[in-house]
Image (cartoon, rainbow, N blue to C red):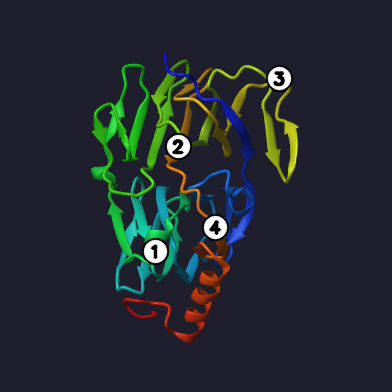
Amino acid sequence: MPEVLKIRKVIRSKPTLEGAGVHLRRAFGFAEVPLFDPFLLLDDFRGDEPRAYVKGFPWHPHRGIETITYLLRGTVEHGDSLGHSGVIGPGDAQWMTAGSGIVHQEMPKGDADGAMHGFQLWANLPAAQKMTEPRYRDVKSAVVPEIVRPNGTRVRIICGELDGKQGPVRDVKIEPEFLDVTVPAGAEFVHRVRTGHTVFAYVIDGRASFCRERGALAYETEGANYFDFPRSPLVGNTDLVLFGGGEQLVVAAEDVPVRFLLVSGKPLREPVAWYGPIVMNTREELRTAFEEYENGTFLRRGRHP
């Protein structure tokens, strides 16, 4: 029998402001490197009022990373220095490889009720691909496979493979998996993960027990540990579970359904030099990137908008 994954840490996401004033929750970021290698950041941007998000993320540069945007409600209009522009909507994803450098903007808009809900994940690029040519993978909801298991569990596969079906995003160096999983109350989701990969789950609705953990779970927030509910084994909405050793994920939805993002990837184990939207391997590379941005030589292709 495969060994069930161990829970390494449970993290409560933290409110923060980004872009031109977007209210969001950060599940992890700079302070957690290298715990999440090869991933750098996960933001959950949701709101019921446009004033919380409408100012968006105006023109800004990226180099050395990939950004993965996944949307549940509302739309995001995007444009970039290569001349691309478009809109992603509910169920769509955008996998952007910034590579050697790109300047882009992302402007969220609410649905008919004024609501917006989406996520952005940053993945590091290996040193050998830091200066690769930028590119987009635009993934429309219609091409994302959905698996429905006999117990009613539904899984959308953006990247990775499950039950013989493969997601549309492929050929990524870190061998990532990105699944949107919904487990009905009283059901269990069991999934084999790759040995040695970094694996985490971020709960976006409901609550569940993870990996048959029955004791109280120690949460980390604002640098302190505390216990959520007395002797509670459940992980709830906007909480993240980082796993340690093991080969098999087990998630049990007990009294209510649970929905979560399941993400995994192969660690790079390389040095990280990170400031703002640019992530390189050395401080010298980082300094060069910002100098190039200031003097107008940052882009290898396209032009600054």
Mark on residue 272?
4
295 shown above or below 1:
below
Label whose residue precedes the other's in the sequence (2 or 3)? 2
Q: Quadrant of the N terminus?
A: top left
> Comparing marks 4 and 1, which lies closer to the viewer?
4
Instruction: Answer with mark 4 or mark 1, whichever residue precedes in sequence.
Output: 1
Q: Label 3's element?
A: loop
- Going from the N terminus, do you reach mark 4 or mark 2 first? 2
Image x and y of residue 202, in percent = 52, 38
* Residue assigned mark 1: 98
* Within-10-Å neighbours for mark 4: few <14, some 14–19, many 20+: some
Amino acid bearing label 1: Ala
Residue 198 shown left or right of residue 29 in the figure: left
Q: Amino acid at mark 2?
A: His
Residue in front for this viewpoint, 96 or 232: 96
Which callout, 2 or 1, points to the residue nearer the camera? Answer: 2
Dot 3 corresponds to which residue?
231
Q: Which mark is residue 177?
A: none
* Left or right for 182, reference 82: right
Tell me where residue 94 sits by quadrant. Answer: bottom left
